[in-house]
Amino acid sequence: MKNNKKTLIQGLNNSHILYGDFLFIEQENSLEVKQDSLLKHQDSVNNQADHYTLTIPKWLYEIAKQVEYNPFTQTVEGIFD
């Protein structure tokens, strides 16, 4: 397994970090996982945070930012971990 490392989401006290053999294609908002890779949710001192390590299967993924729509104020806001 290739040892690439990419922080996908950085929260206030934790982050989602992908480890493995993958190619992040920023201009296309896609992620090509060439071999099964590992997604770790780590706190600020690199300990496991809210969930266990997940295996991300080989695939071509589209990266999307999650948003929340408020029908009362008719606003769209980003979701932060």
Image (cartoon, grey):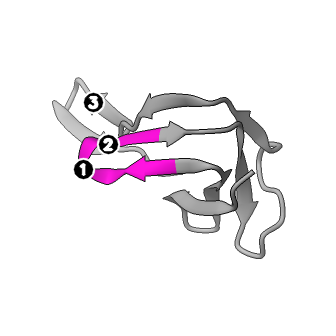
Q: Secondary structure at mark 3?
A: strand
Rounded to the nearest whole Å, what is the CA distance between mark 1 and mark 3?
29 Å
* Image height of 12 relative to 79, above or below: below
Question: Mark 3 or mark 1, which is nearer the start of the sequence?
Answer: 1
Q: Earlier in the sequence, mark 3 or mark 2?
A: 2
Which is more toward the observer, 35 or 67?
Answer: 35
Q: Which residue is mark 1?
A: 27
What residue sits right under mark 2 in the picture? 29
Kindly identify the residue that appears in the image at 27 percent across and 30 percent down: 70
- SS of the residue at dot 2? loop
Q: Name the spot of residue 2 as percent of width and height, x first.
A: 69, 56
Residue 20 sits above or below residue 31 on the image: below
Q: Which residue is mark 3?
A: 70
| Pick the front one: 67 or 53 | 53
Tell me, yes or no, whether the two marked residues, 2 and 1, touch with CB atoms within 8 Å.
yes
Indicate the position of residue 80 as horizontal and vertical percent values. 46, 51
Give the image location of residue 17, x and y in percent: 63, 57
Q: Position of residue 72 (x, y in %)?
A: 22, 26
Q: Residues within 10 Å of mark 2 (few under 14, many from 20)?
A: few
Identify which amino acid the numbered label 1 is placed on. Answer: Gln
Q: Residue at x 62, y 61 (%)?
A: 4
Left or right: where does residue 43 sit relative to residue 32? right
Pointers 1 and 3 in contact (CB under 8 A)?
A: no
Q: Which residues are magenta?
A: 23-31
The residue sitting at 24% across, 50% down in the picture is 27
Q: Quadrant of residue 66?
A: top left
Q: Give SS at disc 1.
A: helix
